[in-house]
Image (spheres, grey):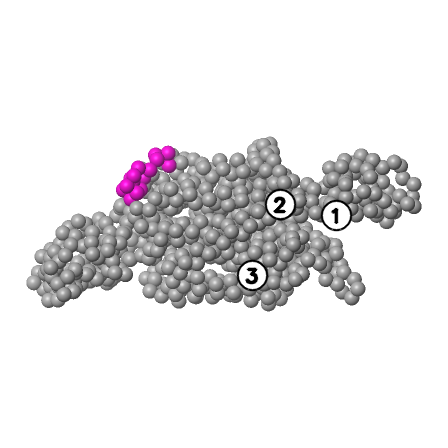
């Protein structure tokens, strides 16, 4: 029988199978039991002839292969933001200049912080709660704060997945339901005619949206059903933890790249693709002088890698000891960036085709009006051949419009500017890109239902792979911390999904899209920035950057570049504090607004959040950050009352690592249990796990 430091009993049974290898079956208990007196040992206890105190550790699941882990980590970091937010930011903030700025911040801040989370999870082998409690009990609130933010994000992120399911189902129609405007009697629906078929379908058919956040409206039954389907998929994919999630990742993480490559090949062959790509990447270096551009680039780096969610820590905690997490940090970050660039190429190749098609149709309409007016009204000599519309290029028309066209006055018709650049600026932000602009472009493709189904199946997989990581950021740290949840993982996973669905019904109201925007903009950004600041300070200053680098050197069996010490201690905290300051400044100087759809005007408009909505978003920020100070105060009170170990005992010990050793590699016992004394003397503990003996370093024997 072996005992822990705190005199809690650890049952250690030795079972010999026909004189062959002895198996150590161990189980940890939290009950406080006295050490047995000499001569009063259990008769069934093998006489190993040694008394030792053993530090026990819970057996953790392991990734079945490095490929599963890599795909899971990549699937979490590569999400919907790579497809619609990164292209939008590039478009709005200097094109190629923004990409250079993004790469700079990725190298200075993103990769070091991503490596920190990978290394912390792999070395300490716990979820976010356990990792920061390991550093110091006073910092345990950081992990709980990460869980709260993950929960907020999961609530609205699955709604977006539900939208993708709705559009995927609607894609199996010919023609596509958003290809033309519906009619009422013999007339086109006014709202659709004043906007576009895709905008009308999105705002009226999919969302049936209200004019403002103040108007709630009833639930949307179709979107509610799609939300239920999304949560069901998440539950089924995660009911066995990483054992089931890892298998799903083979498809959900790889399939989006297949689709992006298909769209790229198709996109570059379209008329107007080169104009779209050129417009996208043309560098405008003057934007580097704008502080808000730096803020947006840093925020995109921050969310692209999933920093602060705890999901990176959770996934890496299931790795073997010698996994090269340093290489993983560069590989995942690099693939993430290249995915963003690939998605940007695809988006603007397709949008270039859409813009050129729309602009060309505009030229034809205007030239037809001019040609018809010439037969009844004397015009001055035109500087363009209106009778041969097909030969007129967009550049020729733009030049003619500036010099002559805008001065023409044709009764009953307004000659407009048909600008390719203006069309490229339309509808490229967030959901507007995926569900309006890109969707409209696909209606122009031959075989549009096929391309539409492919696109929304890609969005579905991108969303699900990120959603799996987000849920891991909730489930892993909580099951690591609470034994009851650990013993009922499936029930806990199912209940979490049910609760998420019930609360998520808030987003399926007619005004639900406005709440999605609110949660996306405010429930995660500021709390996550604060969490990452505390994470960095905890490792670099509380635990000690030098000590952490030594832990990693022992874990990886190779030295880690000392430059990370200075990155973690100085560069990253300063950069994150600057990002936090810029974000707070923007919030206080400008009243938060949201984009609403006005049914009468059939157009979008910016509206300020009402006071009650400001109270809600403020509450979201406070609730997400509140665990950090609460955890600190709680730990201090327990320590003062003598119910919590001091930081010096609980926080500053070597990072735990575990490995699995096959049974056949253990020394033969010959039926003598004492033959395992050598194994125990090597400062290792063992337990049986799936036909293997698990052993790990312990600080006390």
- Residue on which the image places disc 1: 361
Task: Give whichever of 527, 68 is nearer the camera.
Answer: 68
Query: Could you tell me which residue is drawn at 66 percent across and 43 percent down?
Result: 272
| Mark 1 secondary-structure assignment | helix
**First of labels 3, 1 by sequence position:** 3
**Eye-nearest disc, 2 or 3:** 2
Tell me, yes or no, if residue 484 can be seen here.
no
**First of labels 1, 2 by sequence position:** 2
**Residue 302 belongs to the span the image colors magenta:** no
Query: Could you tell me which residue is drawn at 43 percent across and 35 percent down?
Result: 571
Please say if 503 is above or below 546. below
Q: Position of residue 115 (x, y in %)?
A: 39, 43
Q: Which residues are magenta?
A: 549-564
Q: Residue furthest left?
A: 39
Q: Residues within 10 Å of mark 1 (few under 14, many from 20)?
A: few
- Residue on which the image places disc 3: 165
Please say if 376 is above or below 489. above
Q: Position of residue 435 (x, y in %)?
A: 62, 54
Tell me, yes or no, whether the two marked residues, 3 and 1, touch with CB atoms within 8 Å. Answer: no
- Residue on which the image places disc 2: 269
Q: Position of residue 436 (x, y in %)?
A: 64, 53
**Eye-nearest disc, 1 or 2:** 2
> How far apart are labels 1 and 2 at the CA level?
20 Å
Q: How many marks?
A: 3
């Amino acid at each position: 029988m072996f005992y822990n430091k705190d005199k809690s009993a650890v049952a250690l049974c030795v079972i010999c199978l026909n004189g062959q290898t002895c198996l150590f079956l161990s189980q940890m208990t939290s009950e406080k039991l006295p050490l047995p007196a000499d001569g009063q040992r259990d008769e069934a206890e093998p006489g190993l002839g040694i008394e030792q105190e053993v530090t026990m550790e819970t057996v953790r699941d392991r990734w079945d292969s490095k490929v599963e882990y890599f795909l899971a980590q990549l699937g979490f970091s590569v999400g919907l933001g790579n497809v619609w937010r990164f292209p939008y930011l590039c478009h709005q903030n200097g094109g190629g200049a923004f990409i250079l700025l993004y790469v700079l911040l990725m190298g200075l801040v993103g990769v070091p912080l991503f490596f920190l989370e990978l290394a912390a999870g792999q070395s300490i082998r716990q979820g976010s709660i356990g990792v920061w409690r390991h550093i110091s009990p006073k910092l345990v609130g950081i992990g709980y704060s990460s869980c709260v933010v993950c929960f907020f994000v999961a609530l609205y992120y699955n709604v977006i997945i539900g939208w993708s399911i709705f559009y995927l189902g609607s894609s199996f129609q010919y023609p596509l339901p958003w290809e033309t405007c519906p009619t009422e009697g013999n007339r086109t629906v006014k709202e659709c005619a004043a906007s576009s078929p895709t905008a009308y379908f999105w705002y009226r058919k999919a969302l049936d949206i209200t004019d403002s956040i103040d108007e709630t409206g009833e639930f949307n039954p179709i979107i509610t059903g799609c939300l239920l389907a999304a949560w069901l998929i998440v539950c089924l994919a995660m009911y066995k933890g990483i054992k089931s999630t890892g298998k799903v990742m083979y498809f959900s993480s790889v399939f989006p790249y297949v689709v992006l490559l298909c769209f790229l090949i198709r996109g570059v062959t379209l008329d107007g693709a080169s104009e779209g790509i050129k417009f996208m990447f043309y560098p405008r270096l003057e934007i580097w002088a704008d502080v808000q551009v730096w803020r947006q680039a840093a925020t995109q780096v921050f969310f692209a890698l999933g920093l602060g969610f705890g999901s990176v820590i959770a996934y890496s905690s299931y790795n073997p000891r010698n996994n090269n997490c340093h290489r993983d940090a560069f590989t995942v970050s690099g693939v993430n960036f290249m995915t963003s660039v690939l998605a940007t190429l695809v988006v603007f190749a397709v949008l270039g085709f859409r813009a050129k098609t729309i602009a060309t149709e505009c030229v034809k309409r205007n030239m037809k009006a001019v040609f018809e007016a010439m037969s009844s009204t004397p015009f001055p000599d035109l500087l363009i051949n209106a009778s041969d519309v097909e030969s007129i290029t967009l550049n020729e028309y733009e030049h003619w419009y500036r010099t002559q066209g805008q001065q023409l006055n044709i009764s009953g018709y307004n000659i407009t500017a048909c600008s390719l650049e203006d069309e490229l600026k339309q509808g490229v932000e967030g959901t507007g890109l995926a569900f309006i602009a890109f969707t409209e472009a696909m209606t122009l493709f031959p075989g549009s239902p096929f391309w539409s189904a492919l696109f929304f199946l890609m969005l579905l997989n991108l969303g699900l792979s990120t959603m799996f990581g987000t849920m891991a950021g909730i489930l892993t740290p909580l099951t690591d911390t609470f034994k009851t949840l650990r013993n009922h993982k499936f029930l806990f996973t199912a209940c979490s999904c049910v609760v998420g669905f019930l609360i998520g019904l808030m987003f399926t109201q007619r005004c639900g899209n406005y709440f999605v925007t609110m949660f996306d903009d405010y429930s995660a950004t500021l709390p996550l920035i604060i969490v990452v600041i505390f994470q960095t300070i905890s490792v670099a200053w509380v635990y000690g950057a030098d000590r952490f680098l030594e832990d990693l050197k022992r874990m990886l069996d190779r030295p880690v570049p000392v430059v990370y010490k200075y990155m973690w201690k100085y560069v990253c905290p300063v950069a994150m504090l600057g990002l936090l300051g810029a974000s707070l400044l923007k919030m206080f100087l400008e009243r938060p607004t949201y984009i609403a759809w006005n049914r009468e005007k059939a157009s979008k408009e910016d509206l300020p959040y009402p006071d009650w909505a400001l109270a809600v978003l403020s509450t979201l920020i406070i609730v997400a950050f509140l665990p950090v100070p609460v955890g600190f105060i709680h730990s201090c009170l327990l320590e003062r009352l003598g119910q919590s170990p001091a930081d010096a005992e609980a926080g500053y010990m070597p990072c735990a690592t575990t490995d699995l050793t096959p049974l056949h590699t253990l020394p033969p016992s010959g039926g003598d249990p004492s033959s395992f004394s050598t194994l125990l003397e090597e400062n290792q503990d063992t337990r049986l796990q799936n036909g293997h003996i698990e052993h790990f370093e312990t600080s006390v024997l």
